[in-house]
Amino acid sequence: MATGTTGPAGSTGTNAPGRAHIRARHLRTDRWWLSPAVTVTILSAFIVYSTWRAFANDDYFAEPYVSPFYSPCLASECDSMPMSANAPLFGDWWGLSPALLILIFPLGFRLTCYYYRKAYYRGFWASPSACAVPEPRGSYSGETRFPLILQNIHRYFFWFAAVVAVILTWDVLIAFRDEHGAWGHMGLGTLVLLANVLLIWAYTLSCHSCRHIVGGKLKHFSKHPVRYRLWGFVSRLNGRHMELAWASLFGVALADLYVYLVASGAFDDPRFF
Amino acid sequence: MSEVERHSYDVVVIGAGGAGLRAAIEARTRGLRTAVVCKSLFGKAHTVMAEGGIAASMGNVNSQDGWKVHFRDTMRGGKFLNHWRMAELHAKEAPDRVWELESWGALFDRTADGRISQRNFGGHEYPRLAHVGDRTGLELIRTLQQRIVALQQEDEREFGDPEARLKVFQECTVTRLLTVPDAGSEAGNRIAGAFGYWRESGRFTVFDAPAVVLATGGIGKGFKVTSNSWEYTGDGQALALLAGAPLINMEFVQFHPTGMVWPPSVKGILVTESVRGDGGVLLNSEGKRFMFRYIPDVFKEKYAQTPAEGDRWYTDQENNRRPPELLPRDEVARAINSEVKAGRGSPHGGVFLTVVGRMAGGTEEIRRKLPSMYHQFKELADVDITAEAMEVGPTCHYVMGGIAVDPDTAATPGVLGLYAAGEVAGGMHGSNRLGGNSLSDLLVFGRRAGEHAARYAEEIGEARREAAQEQLDAAEAEALAPFAVESAENPYTVHQELQQTMNDLVGIIRREGEMTEALTRLDELKARAAKAGVEGHRQYNPGWHLALDLRNMLLVCECVARSALERQESRGGHTRDDFPAMSAEWRRVVLACSIVDPDAETLSVRLTRGEAVPMRADLLELFERDELTKYLTDAELPGKDG
Amino acid sequence: MTYKADFRIWRGDTDGGELRDFKVEVNEGEVVLDIIHRLQATQAPDLAVRWNCKAGKCGSCSAEINGRPRLLCMTRMSTFAPDEVVTVTPMRTFPVIRDLVTDVSFNYAKARQVPSFTPPEGLKPGEYRMQQVDVERSQEFRKCIECFLCQNTCHVIRDFEDNKAAFSGPRFLMRIAELDMHPLDVADRQKAAQEEHGLGLCNITKCCTDVCPEHIHITDNALIPMKERVADRKYDPLVWLGNKIRRRGSGD
Ligand SMILES: Cc1cc2nc3c(=O)[nH]c(=O)nc-3n(C[C@H](O)[C@H](O)[C@H](O)COP(=O)(O)OP(=O)(O)OC[C@H]3O[C@@H](n4cnc5c(N)ncnc54)[C@H](O)[C@@H]3O)c2cc1C
Ligand code: SF4
Ligand code: SF4
Ligand code: FES
Ligand code: FES
């Protein structure tokens, strides 16, 4: 039968003792590097854009639209945004851009998201870049140690993200008023914010932690028919979690960009009624 | 002879399919030191391929089911040639064996009230097959495998060694059984162990044990078009023959009606019967459901006469008869064969089988109920079964014949200490096996074989002996022969010719002249096989392994051809063009094959006729007299009054 | 369509080996295993390869084709261009035995470390009642044919031999999930998944899911839910508190 399986401690990689000796590190002939390269490019572009916008502390409100980067505003020095979420919990000692206060939550949510983890482990850490392509390092401890062990608190970010999603929904509602506060308005901006919030919700609800909380943790679905149906719904969304992660990422960036263009006067919001 | 590795056990089980694992679990549970030896990796045995289900009359879906109904169906399916006692034990014990699997972790599909769901299958009167989608065999083998692991974990806790009482020797092929003389048995000997080689290293190994259970499965690799894997080279049958135990009913080989026919490289791969059980129908090139024209007289009252009635049956089984697509396999296989011969076949020489529009739940339901079929056709043939018809034709599937055993103990009458269970054993299925009856057979008789092997090993105690050194030397010399021959034949070529011969001359429809021809060719092939040589060394050398398997295949194929030539009637898995009728006289005849001389240069088999044991009166009473007259001679029929 | 294909096959054993070139006939509808068999029958009778069913059901014929872990019997030749060189090597995570055959005993050793199914005390065979919706999750995992391709591709052990001791691999982490979700299993498996079987080493990069020939959603349906269950037990003080108050396991 079988002989021993492990080589001497410390030997690593596909050329560890005992394994078939093949000189090539990998033999993949397809364009395996494409997907991590695309991931890196898009994520980097988003980071650059959002950093600029988050620190800009300007052009984030154009009655009745508020940029998702700045809502809710937890600092006291925000523009006055009638009816929208001015919640100066932090008082006036906060001197930096108010976006930073709130962006922590969606950022944390996405940073600990099971899908984004896969994407950046593969793209930025090459851990691994693609399947059966060896990692460029000598040892590996996965998510067992600090800081990566913190990934386990993803569920808390889910709850925060859900709260943020509620607030952003409110922002869409108030985008149905015109600049004088009268109801019955709809402009392109309303639609942009609406699309954004739908994507945010879809992404948030498709979260693995959400799937676990609504029903995944149960042992007997049959004893909880309502939660089972919810779980089924979330599971279907969850099957598209990757697509939703990207779509909603583009969604927020575009929504913010739209508000920026309108607020900075570069573009006039077309009104439908 | 060089030093060989030796292992001593109480019970050695050869084969790690359903039968072997169940036997091993039983022997170990009775506290005996047990070894399981298998040619492939643990958990890969042929049983994984079983799809449709396990037949057991639990009555979960239709409460009218019970062992008596199951018994009747089994006897009818086997055309009354079955050993009735095996059929009886099988029908009675199958439900317990299935429930036991559940307590070891198996997860069958469920009914609405949480019991094990059961599905329809050819020849079974009620929905009877416990199943998991269409991967029931996988569930069975994994459950038994995990049960073995559980027992090993127990031993680890108790003895600090998981393999203290149960060890699996994987990728180890047994080539000879070892015996010592014993006046008390028919063949004059009793078991002392087994001799084999490690596939990985090519080194030899000896198992010393007073009791051996053979559970090595079937013989399909003797045929060209087969649903069986490379393991099915008739090893167990040949090992038993060589040790002195006879084979019976070897003429009965089941051709499953629905194997894939296209592309060539997958020809023979099984299309599970559940396709028909769940609504699939067979069509010829004219788009006709031809099966209605092929309902034989013995089954006339049990099957629908019109497509409309057949279709109603799927939803209302009380008031309708089942569609003829669900006739026993031999009938359907012959019907397909005739359609193709009559020029009404599909482009690649089969007929059409379709589920399109046959399930209420549409595409979705097809994919849920037949996931692996969907997968198989998609990936291997580029056919989407939810939208297109499959092309299917008969494929060699199962051998009903096998090692003669005592129904209650699974002991071979020939050699003391030798037991056999599963496909390798004969008698249970008569002339034709019903779908789903094999998996239950494995469990019922695997357990019995394990139990009785264990008892025997306990009884024999101190009297156990090791085989004489000459036997080991001879076995070693035999195994090394292929390296020594000059002017070598290519074993792959010999194998291909053997398969072609069996397929063409001893296939689904048989004729005297062809079978005589086959026997001549088998003789030639034997001579060539003796010269089959191999290149390279002993380490994991497939050419060598095949050269060794040739001996077994040739012996077993000779048994099939000889018995088939002898039996002058058509019944179940044996169809004679020249003797198309079923004969009540022949029903009583049991053809047995035994080896002429196990040490001869050229091995050959001899045929003897035996008589079937008459069925117990209380079992006969389970049938209508009218029905019995179709099978039994007047003398065998029960008196008018009882 | 018949043509001659270029194959490069790794031949060798523990002492070393190399990729050898072969030219071999390919016919319509064939899979890579057919080609290997043709090579055995015509050019290399002792070419070692492990297989059984040739129908994607037993999981014996695992190897790597053009650098990707695959079943030889389920890889159709039509997926390659006729002029493409097809490279076949043994799995590169397990010790090689010879040619395309590797020693997969690592997996059997890991299987034995997962405590087996534990039914409730006193429940007799035949009395088991389970609802279809409750068994479906575990049924998905039981489709596994133990081809060990997921184990082979997982970078945790593929790239780091020294992790083998601490990590059971996707196949057996999934087995733990299967039992944890089994409606009648009463053993506590969640902490052990992390502490004894190395669930934390998995960084959910999904290569196991990518290669699984049974298309089991290993990562989404087994590993991540298991990580969430572990988080409940080890990393989430609120759930811990809640359970303390409600007494674990009362509701469901
Ligand atoms: C495609 C397919 C589908 C099927 N579907 C069904 C179904 O739905 N229902 C049903 O009831 N039946 C079905 N059957 C039939 C059933 O699966 C088999 O008859 C049954 O699995 C045989 O089991 P076994 O335990 O006798 O042997 P196997 O499972 O075949 O095991 C044989 C064992 O013996 C070992 N072995 C063989 N020779 C040697 C040797 N020389 N030395 C050491 N070890 C050796 C092998 O390695 C293997 O472990 C199906 C068969 C096929 C091919
Ligand atoms: S998802 Fe986890 S288990 Fe699967 S391959 Fe990646 S690291 Fe390994
Ligand atoms: S989970 Fe999939 S890839 Fe892994 S062993 Fe099972 S079948 Fe193979
Ligand atoms: S948001 Fe991606 S998993 Fe939670
Ligand atoms: S040979 Fe069984 S999976 Fe390929």
Image: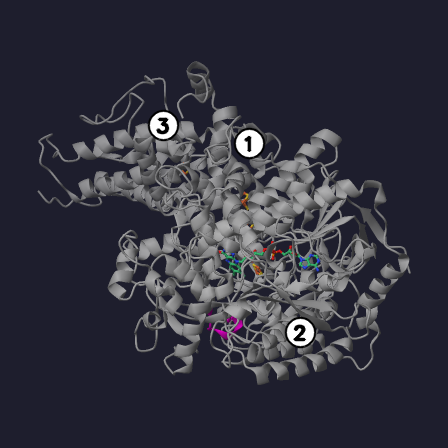
Q: Which mark is residue B156?
A: none
- Residue B532, image x, y percentages: 76, 76
Mark 1, residues whose alpha carbon is within 10 Å: few (<14), some, or many (≥20)? Answer: some
Q: Nearer the viewer, mark 1 or mark 2?
A: 2
Quadrant in the rendering for residue C221: top left
Q: Does dot 1 land on a helix, a strand or a loop? A: loop
Q: Amino acid at mark 1?
A: Thr
Examine the rendering and report whether any part of residue C215 can be seen.
no
Magenta span of residues: B260-268
Closer-to-camera residue (C203/B353):
B353
Q: Amino acid at mark 3?
A: Phe
Q: Which residue is mark 1?
A: C118
Q: Does dot 3 land on a helix, a strand or a loop? A: helix
Instruction: Answer above or below: position of A214 versus B620.
Output: above
Q: Does dot 2 land on a helix, a strand or a loop? A: helix
Screen quadrant of the C terminus of chain C: top left
Quadrant in the rendering for residue B366: bottom left
Pinpoint the chain carrying mark 2: B
Disc 3 to disc 2, C-alpha distance: 76 Å
Q: Which mark is residue B558?
A: 2
Q: Nearer the viewer, mark 1 or mark 3?
A: 1
Examine the rendering and report whether any part of residue C85 can be seen.
yes
Instruction: Answer above or below: position of A168 versus C248.
Output: below
Q: Is residue B266 inside the magenta stretch?
A: yes
Q: Nearer the viewer, mark 3 or mark 2?
A: 2
Q: Which mark is residue A160?
A: 3
Disc 1 to disc 3, C-alpha distance: 38 Å
